[in-house]
Image: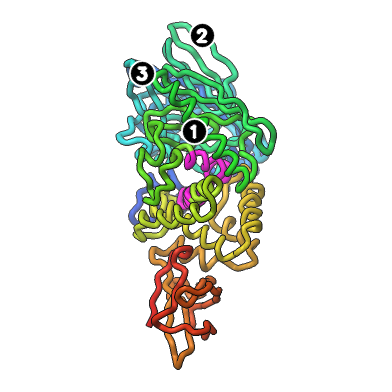
Amino acid sequence: MLRRILLFAALLSLTQAATAQLLQPKAGFTRADSLRGQLTPLRTCYDLNYYHLDVKLDVDKRFLSGSNLFRFTATQDFTRLQFDLFANLSVDKVEYQGKSVPFTREANAVFVTFPQPIRQGTRDQFTVFYSGQPVVAKKAPWDGGFVFTQDAAGKPWVATACQGVGASIWWPTKDHQSDEVDSMLISISVPKGLKDVSNGRLRKVTKLKGGYTRYDWFVNNPINNYDVALNVGDYRHFNGGTYAGEKGPLTLDYWVLPENLTKAKKHFAANVPAMLKAFEYWFGPYPFYEDGYKLVDAPHLGMEHQSAVAYGNKYLNGYLGKDRSNTGWGLKWDFIVIHESGHEWFGNNITSKDIADMWVHESFTTYSESLFVESMFGKQAGQEYLHGQRRNIQNDGSIIGPYGVNKEGSGDMYDKGASLLNMLRVGLDNDDKWRELLRGLNQQFYHQTVTTEQVVDYFRGTGRYLKPVFDQYLRHKTIPTLEIRFDEGQMLARWLADVPEFDMPIQVRTKGGTYQRIFPKTKWEKFAIAGATKENIEVDTFNYYIGVLVE
């Protein structure tokens, strides 16, 4: 036994040394960023299976108190682990096997020490009790935190939105996107006269002493912690019926404020079934049939909270009444309903392991908007909408952010990323195959967390090696330029790109003619385009987001 204890101590010492090395902050980032963003042995030693978040909200005092049960499987032997909770919230105690266990804090990380080793393969649990006043968001949903406001009748209206900053801004959790619980019970206790709407299905409503009511919501499917939501208000519920989807009837439920009830019934009916039809066609079945589909009035613009999508677009078409594409197509439907619901497939079903790869969420979801337009108004309309969105691209940096520090990349992940995906479709020139790939993507990575490398490798299914194309658009701020010159009447072309092996087909034609596909690389090659001259050569810049230089 002594030898085993000494061996374990030695291994623990090595693990801690390795952890310390991993946690050396990158240039421009702090140790707190690394504690939040890196996967160290103190986080990977346990795999989450289940949470029970049980929280009481004192609206008047803006105060939270409650607990979260962590149920997990040990992936290795350990005696110490990390969970996360913002430092402004107090960890009152950590309970294991009925007794309090010691813990320490650094920045927003909490380190728990167990009385004996927890062995690899063991299923175990501990509970964190906490309290305090959570961060109030200054501009939700972009900066994250709680929103405290009132409805039209002056009654409290409270919500959470924490993507990016992290769920640990309001509840104790392993705050890293790579580990999703398999299921979760969310219990929120609120003052009399108010209701809570959270993710999943409402299991039970319990009257408590002191005038509080507890709402128990159960999530049957894996869920990322930033999606877990609290929505408290004087909500009215109405049933939107069921959608006859690919996996059978899907329940549609809407929770809105009293002043919005009449217009919500008409507005949601005009957007939701059409959205589900389009996205199930392109991406496959809605990923959370067991938990249903909900829209919930929110005091912020919106967020993709899984099976409880937050809605705050003021029942207007477009993006708060504006068209991000400036084509007119974006004013024919509600941007928040379509975009945030698109995240049920990309962001909630398929989740990036590191927020640096958040393009997987936003590029595909922004692209989904054009597919919705296409489903409603035809392919040309969808392409026009997508082309119009280029006006929002900044080309200001890498779409992929730095890894291990909880930092996303450029906002170009939305519109530039959507253009990238559309170019893959145009290059494939087979819409049936493209649809098969999109549906297969959601099937292969169903309820999983992924990396950029996994997604890029998946698109080998196009029959082409696309890593250089993805690298150019995701990892470099500049777009590739097609350079064309003429030598004794012969057209030559090459790509100017940051990626040396960049290789992408492109369509060219003589003015007014039919497009022909050529396959230039980064070295000059000759291409036979009958009648082409410097003056009449045209490159397809409607479907391809590129630069063109004709010499």
Give neighbour class at mark 1: few <14, some 14-19, many 20+ (Cα, 10 Å). many
Percent position of residue 43, x then y:
53, 42
Give the Cα separation between the discs numbered 3 and 1: 20 Å
Whether residue 353 appears in this view of the structure is: no
Marking on residue 309? 1
Q: Residue at x 35, y 20 (%)?
A: 151
Whether residue 163 appears in this view of the structure is: yes
Dot 2: element: strand
Give the Cα separation between the discs numbered 2 and 1: 26 Å
**Residue 290 falls within the magenta-colored stretch:** no
The residue labelled by disc 3 is 156
- Label 2 or label 1, whichever comes before in sequence order: 2
Percent position of residue 415, x then y:
43, 54
- In this view, which residue lies farthest toward the bottom? 488
* Quarter that holds the C terminus: bottom left
Horizontal relation, residue 118 to residue 369: left or right = right
Percent position of residue 411, x then y:
39, 52
| Magenta residue span | 338-366
Of the residues shown, which amino acid type is indicated by label 2? Lys
